[in-house]
Structures are given as C-alpha cells and as structure tokens.
Image (spheres, grey):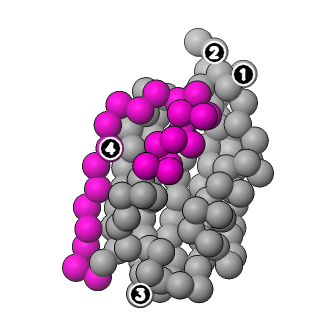
Amino acid sequence: MFKFRGQHFIFDVYVDNKDILYFNHKILEQIKIQLEKWHTTIIDSCNYIFDTGGYSLNILISESHFSIHTYPEKKALFVDFFTCTSYEIKVEEVEQFIKELFKAKEIKTYYLRRGNE
C-alpha cells in the first residue's frame, strides 16, 4: 500500500445578507489567491449559475478540489475542500477565510484527515 495523506475541510455556512451568495468574480479571484497561499496548484475552474441566482463553483487543483454551492433563498452555502498537498493547512485558517469571505453569521466545520500517514 502506498502512503497517502490528505486534508478534507467541509463547511456549512449561513449568512445574514443573501447578496453575498450571488456569483461574483471577485470572490473567485480571492479564493484562487488563497489556494495558492495554501500551496495548491490551480488547473481550472468552472461555475454554473442557477435560475435562483445561486451557483456551483468548482476549482480543480492538482491536489484535488475546492467547491462551493450557494443557496441565496436559504441564505446558505456549502464548501468542500480536499487537498493532498504536503503543506499542513490549519482548520482554523480555512474557517476564518470562509467566514471573512462570505461574512458568515454561523459556520459549521467538519474536518477529516484522510489516508494512512
């Protein structure tokens, strides 16, 4: 068996202002900048905007992925970030970034260490 180590961050985020949950290129750029700070390599990104104004955003990184699904009508979004970079990312750092980026009023954080290392 090969050695593998990954970090999986999952967030349920609730906001007061639903306007932050509509697609915005500035948010995409801030996420890309932060992913580079976390030593990931961005390959590509794509998004889909729904009739409700919510969107799904997926950023493919060589180490795995970062995805967001927003629901403005519920004032909620869900984030999934998995990486197998050798750089150790602190849970609190990712949580703080998400809180500030979306001006979260409430956030539920789930964290998994993955692999056998």
Read off the residue under disc 4. Answer: 45
Mark 3 sits on what residue?
Answer: 73
Of the residues tagged 2 and 4, which is closer to the observer?
4
Quarter of the rendering containing residue 22: bottom left
| Residue at the outermost front position | 26
Nearest the eye: 29 or 65: 29
**Disc 2 to disc 1, how far (Cα)?**
6 Å
Regarding mark 1 in the picture, which secondary structure is present there?
loop
Query: Which residue is pictured at 36% across the width and 58% down the height?
Result: 25
Front label number (3 vs 1): 3
Quadrant that contains the C terminus: top right
Q: Which residues are magenta?
A: 29-52
* Crowding at mark 2 (Cα within 10 Å: few <14, some 14-19, many 20+): few
- Report crowding for label 3: few under 14, some 14 to 19, many 20 or more residues within 10 A (C-alpha): few
For marks 2 and 1 on the same chain, the one whose residue lies earlier in the sequence = 2
Residue 63 x/y as whole percent: 49, 28
- The residue beneath circle 1 is 117
Q: CA distance from mark 2 to mark 4?
A: 28 Å
Where is mark 2, residue-wise? 3
Q: Measured along the vertical axis of the image, is residue 75 above or below residue 96? A: below
